[in-house]
Each structure stands twice: as structure tokens, then as C-alpha cells.
Image (spheres, grey):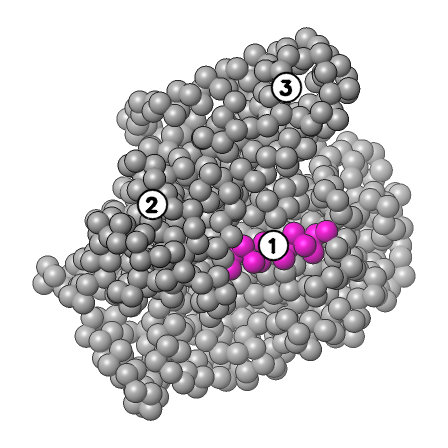
Amino acid sequence: MAIGGHRIEGVRDSRKKLAGLGTASPQEKRSVLKHHHERMLALAKSAEAGLNAPKVGQVYSRPSTAQRQAPAPKSPVQELHDAFKHSLAEFERSIERAGLEELHREVVLETVKANATRIGSGVHGLPLAAAPCANAHPSCGRVCEARGAHACAACHLVSYCRKECQKEHWPVHKRDCKHSDVGPGWQPRWKREGRRPNWLTEGIPQLGPLSEHLWGNTPAFSLLGPPGSEAARGLLQESDDVIRLCFAASGDLRNVVSTIAGLPVGYRGRVRVIANDHNPKTAARNLVLLQILGQLGEDGIDMAIAVWHSLAVTEAQDLALSLLVDNLNLEEVLEDDSKASWAVKKSRSRINARFARPVWARLVQMMTSPLTLQSAADQRAAKLGDPSRADFVDRMLQSFRPFHRASIARFRDFGLLLPFGAFNAHHNTPSKFLLDPEAGYTLDHLADPLWGWRIDEVLEAGKRHNVPKNDLHGSLFFLLRERLASVVEKMRTAEIVFELFCEDASDLANRLRVTGVFDAGEKTVPAVPGGVTNKSGSGSTKQRKRRGKSEGTEPPAPRHATEVGLFQRVEVSNICDENYVGVTRVLRDWGRLLAPGGVLVGLFMNWTTDVSSGTARLFAGMKPDEYLTATRRVGEAAKKCPGVLELVQSQMMQFDGTALPNFGHDYSKDFEAYLRQRGAVKEAAKQGLVRSGVHQIVAPRLGVPVGAPKKSVPIEFLKTVDDWYWSVFANDGTGTEVYTEWVKQR
């Protein structure tokens, strides 16, 4: 049987002798790769109680009847797919009659693995390992399958294998190459209409009740420290037993991925990673992404990128995803709230999930979502095209060079993270783990995965894969391929245990103080003296209640991180902001879980607008005289670099130069005053923490290097027009973000 034009092979002959499978008909053997849609629907029904229970994190409201769209008519492909699912359901019943149900889970992953070459994002489901020739004609299904070698000299967005392909494709490509968004005369709408922009008259639009942050908007970094740095080498050398890392508010997995990828090639040590996020959808997505990498390895990388960042996946990817989720044994998980654990194929690594029932129910609900691709695309287009937000979109676009705008516009139009010239017609199935089953597309109107990665690393990855220089999202695609491939390799060579949670960060800290971090077969004691010892770290809630505190032990004072389960690194994202947890509470919660010499990394994104602190002022935390001084400093620095002054003046003329002085202002004194006012300095002293004078893991501000003094300002490090362009104009930062590193005293 073929799905999406690709033949799905059956179980290998060596499996025939198992449980009488050899007596099945040839058609049944070929059909063993089944979707299990009916099973998943039944599972969703059984999980309904979990969905009706109070949910962890964000609460989703159901749309009214008037808001629901009528179901879109089924396409021929969808009808074929429905017929295929019906035949699979029939085969499932035949398996049950033959008593072969126990065989199913054994063969699922083997069958998916045997057909893994069909779940890539390239033509015919092959892995998209290089920038493709852009000569594709979706209307007639004619696609050149060669690699791109020569970029279009006009736009540098696409490439072709030869001149004949470029000439043949020109009638299609000229719509992009000559698009109005990339012309030299492009102007934001407010200027074309002769009015003041909305963001000056109405302020920043508030996020809707269903808006979610599924992608990061600050550049990813490795919690080990920059590759080859003293911080990274020191951690690896000192951690003879095990490295313990915690991402207390991980959001997506970009920092986890960067950290694991940052381990040395061939590293064979032990690593324990906690990744927590309070949003059930984010936590479920993180589990699914790790399962794809852990079970499918390199063959699942394209699929992981699509699930992570794209509106749609291929039918083969959707089918493989259903099989993987089915193989999680969710029936058993929903019956018992004990820790769920899965081994990574052909390795010592494991993936553990300690989710409450509502999170598992949420995962099932997403997997069985009835949302169609057309309705999801319509909802996304309506949100991104909202007239009240149009000026904010143009404000972002005007900072980019013409053909960079085209790359961003392509992603906004299609919602697919692929090279600009890649054939995408086969990405025709909604991405269930990006879209909300009830609300559809819930990301912010400016959300773009590009903001979550360092642009210099994105561009360098593009060069390594011969991506045309203006194809920003194509370059990001191949950066992610490299990072995920490195994660797969490290999961095989090292012993990495991922512990996934979905809790409030403070609640998780309190839990870990009592139970510590546990792994099967590993002797551990509580993270804090006086906590309860739990040898296995698993067991149901009832079992844990029966054990009680009376069975706890009183261990000696902590001496080594691996003895007591303390962390060498903790990253808390921006829950340090007062509109989340707040810096004082974060230091109290997580400072006591750090090993001696361990580092707590925090981010402050909203501190200049924290009116309650008493330090907030006009102009992003600056007094009027400071703002004028910073403005002059930016102008003087711009004059030293040919071509930059014109950029600065252009931004000022477009009413969008108000943030430029932020990149020339030293916020260090104001930030120190802010920390004192919030009680952070006193709390740090109580926890034995000292704020680093020189950072070793992440730069103190965006736009400055790791190791730069805290008083550094971004414009000191901008030497070329490109430096200014990427660091000041073409990014999602405001220039006021501050990172902190707190070190536990030995």
C-alpha cells in the first residue's frame, strides 16, 4: 500500500515466525504499519476525565459554536487516507482475533525504522540533506531532484543545478524575485497611507487569551558554556561521575539541544537533564521531539524539525508520529501516575516523563485533533493578517534588507521551516503538536523560529550547506539539522537521561529538595539534608504516600554534586522577571539546589518596565539626559563605520529609532540598583551565591561577547555594517535584556 506516493513495506521475513504472523495473508503483512486512529480516539475518550480536571499551566477556553468553522470538503488525498485508515482498523481487529496484540509494540518501531527513509522532508520523503534545486512545478508534479549549485544572482534566495533548470523555472520564480515586498520602493503601510503608526498611538497590542510562546525569542546557548571554553572544559573535567543540568523553565528545547550538542565528540560520560515547563502543550511537544530523536535517530531529524517549527508535515511523517505516540503505552500511563520511562534505541540513554494526568490527556487530545490543514491555515492567516497588528509587522519588516524580508514573508505565508526553494506540496497534513485542537494557531503574530538562534551561527550553517545567502530560514533549517544530528550522536555514545516535568518552577524546586533527582539503579539521597529518600524515584502517588517521611534519612552535609543530586548548572530563563516568579524567589528556590561551584543562569527581559521597582523611567529605563547621551554615543559610533549612519538615520526617519540608544547605554548601575531594591542581593548572600563579575556561560547582554565586562555596551563590538545590521536592527531584541550568572560558593 502507498501513502503520499511512497510504498510502505511490511515486517521483515525474520519476524514471520513470531506468534503465528507467518499465517497472515500477504496483504495483512504489508499492512502491519497501521495508523491506529480508532485506538487513539478511544484513548482520547478514556482521557476525558483528565482533560476536565484542573490543568497545569495555561487554561484553554473552547470557541463558541459561532466561532467554529464548518468542516472543509475532503480532498481526494484525504479520502484515500480515510480509506487507508479504515483498512488498518480492519487489520487491527484481525490481529486481536489472532491473539497477536502483544506482537504489535515490538514490530511498530522496527517497521517505522525500516521505512524511515520515507519520512524526510525532501522529494519522495527522502532526507533533505542539502539545499535543493528550486526547479519544481507543483501543478504538474514535476520536480528536479538534484542539489542546488548556482544561486539566482538577482535574489540569492534559491539555487539551481544547471542553467536549464533556472530558465525553465523562471515563470514561477519571478513572482518571488520581483515581489513587491523586496523592491527598493517598499514602504511600511503607515507611510504609504500618510499616517502615524499604530505602535506610536495605541501602544503594544496585548496578547490574546490563547496566545502561546512555543518558540524561544532569545538566542539559544549551551549551558555548558561556549564549546572549548574554560567553563565547558572545567565542568567536564570536574564531573568524573555525572553532569547534572536543570532547565527549570525550558520553553522549547533549543537550549537543551544546544547544550547536548555542545558535549565533546565521542563523549561517553553520564549526563542527567531536567527539562521543565508549566505549559502542558510545551511539555508534551518536548517529549515527542525527544522520542523522535531517540527512536528514529538521524532518519527522524527532518520530521523533528517539521513537528517543532512547521504548520504542516508530510503524510508519512504524520503516520510515523502516530505510531510513535501509540508506542508510548499511554493506556498504562493514564491508569497509573507513576513515572513513564523509555529506552533510547541502541544506547544507554533514557527518556523519562513525570507528568500529571492532564498533561498526558493533553498529548492524546493533540494527537487525535480533528483540525484540518485548511482551517488551521485560515486561522493562521487571519491572525497574521489582523489589521490592528499590521503596523507592528511592517515595523519588524522594515528593519530587514529586501530579500531577507522575502525569506521572512515566505515563512509567514506558508508556515513551513524549509529552504526557500524546497518542494513543499507534500507537506499537506496539519502539525498536530504545533496547532491547538480547539483554538488552532495560537502563536503570536510576530512569532518566528529565527529569533531563537544566533544569527551568525545560522548564516555559517547556511554556508556549509551551500544555501543561498539571503535564505535565512533555509540556513536555519540546516543549523537545526546539524544540532539535532549531534544530539542523536551524543544520545548514543553518552549515557544521557532526560527527566521531563510539567510544573510551576517553584513547585518543582520544592519537590526536588525533598526527592532529589533519581534514576533507576542509581544510589541517590535527597538534594537537601532532611529530605525524603526515594531509592527508585518512581512509584505511584499512593506508593509515595505509604512510604511517608518516616522512611527518610538524614544524610551528611553535601560534599559533591553526584553524591546528593545537586546541579552543576541551572537555567531559569526569564522567570526572574517580576511578572513571573521574581528574582528573589528564584534565588531562594534554586540556589539551595546548586552544587558548590555550580552556576545559576537567569534572564531579565522586562526589568525596565517593572514600575513597582521604582527604577523604571521613560526611555527604557533611562533618564532624559541619559537617553540623549546614549543617542549621541550611537551617532558617534555610527560615523566611524561607513554605511552605518545612513542605516541609523533611516530608522529615525521611519519613527523607529527610539530603541537605538538602548544599544549604547550602560545599564549596569541601574540594574544593580534594581537587584538591591528587589532584595536579590540579600537573598543571594543567604543562599551562598555570588553574582559573577565576568560571565563564562552566556554574555551579560545581547550583542556583546561572553566574558565581556558587565558595563559593556553592544556598540563597542560593532565593526562592520553587517555587525550593526544583525545586532541592532535585524533581530527581535530591545537592547535592554540582561543575563545574570550566580555562582554557589565552595
Reading the image, the residue beneath label 1 is 485
Indicate the position of residue 622 as horizontal and vertical percent values.
37, 78
Gap in angstroms between the C-alphas marked 1 and 3: 32 Å
Residue at 34 percent of width and 24 percent of height: 75
Whether 636 is among the magenta residues is: no
Q: Earlier in the sequence, mark 1 or mark 2?
A: 2
Mark 2 or mark 3, which is nearer the start of the sequence? Answer: 3
User: Marks 3 and 2, Cα distance to the nearest angstrom?
Assistant: 35 Å
Q: Which residue is mark 2?
A: 136
Disc 1 marks a residue whose amino acid type is Ala
Q: Is there a contact, CB below 8 Å, between mark 1 and mark 2?
A: no
Q: Nearer the viewer, mark 1 or mark 3?
A: 3
Kind of element beneath mark 2:
strand
Label for residue 29?
3
Nearest the viewer among 401 and 463 is: 463
Q: Answer with left or right where residue 414 lies relative to residue 390.
A: right
Residue under the point 45% across and 17% down: 83
Provide the residue span drawn in magenta: 479-492
Q: Is residue 491 left or right of residue 447?
A: right
